Amino acid sequence: MIMTYFFFMMKYIINYRKVLIMEHCECCANCKHCLAIPRNNKYNDVDYLCLITGYFISSLYIDRKRIRRFTFGGKELLCKYENKRG
């Protein structure tokens, strides 16, 4: 019972942290060019695709100014971030 409550609270804190990050930084989660594609498996996984570059995105909640994305060949992908709200 205690472990269940602990895991519930950890999941709540992580989700709350993601919401705070999403509201205050320019990350791919806020970009209107980011497309969420469900995998339709039993885990309800979601893949995120950048429509500008055509590549799938990992580390979705990291500020785009702190991370650079590269192709498999080493070419840097240019980000054309636009906020979903704006």
Image: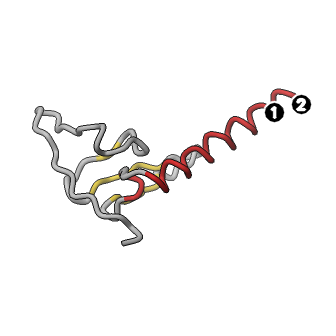
Which element type, helix, strand or loop, lies under badge 2? loop
Give the Cα distance between marks 1 and 2. Answer: 5 Å
**At which x and y percent is residue 71?**
17, 38
Q: Residue at x 17, y 34 (%)?
A: 72
The x, y position of residue 8, in whole percent, is 75, 39
Q: Quadrant of the C terminus?
A: bottom left
Looking at the picture, which amino acid does disc 2 mark?
Met
**Classed neighbour count for the residue bearing mark 2: other residues with Cα under 10 Å, few (<14), some (14–19), many (≥20):** few
Place of residue 37 in the rendered image (x, y in percent of width and height, measured from the top left) = 41, 56
Measured as percent of width and height from the top left, residue 31 is found at 35, 59
- Could you tell whether 13 is left or right of 71 in the image? right
Q: Secondary structure at mark 1?
A: helix
Query: Do the numbered discs 1 and 2 sit on residues whose CB atoms are within 8 Å?
Result: yes
- Residue sitting nearer the eye, 34 or 85: 85
Mark 2 — residue? 1
Q: Which mark is residue 4?
A: 1
Three-letter residue code for mark 1 = Thr
Examine the rendered structure and indicate whether residue 40 appears above or below residue 13: below
Q: With respect to residue 64, does 84 lie above or below?
A: below
Q: Quadrant of residue 84?
A: bottom left
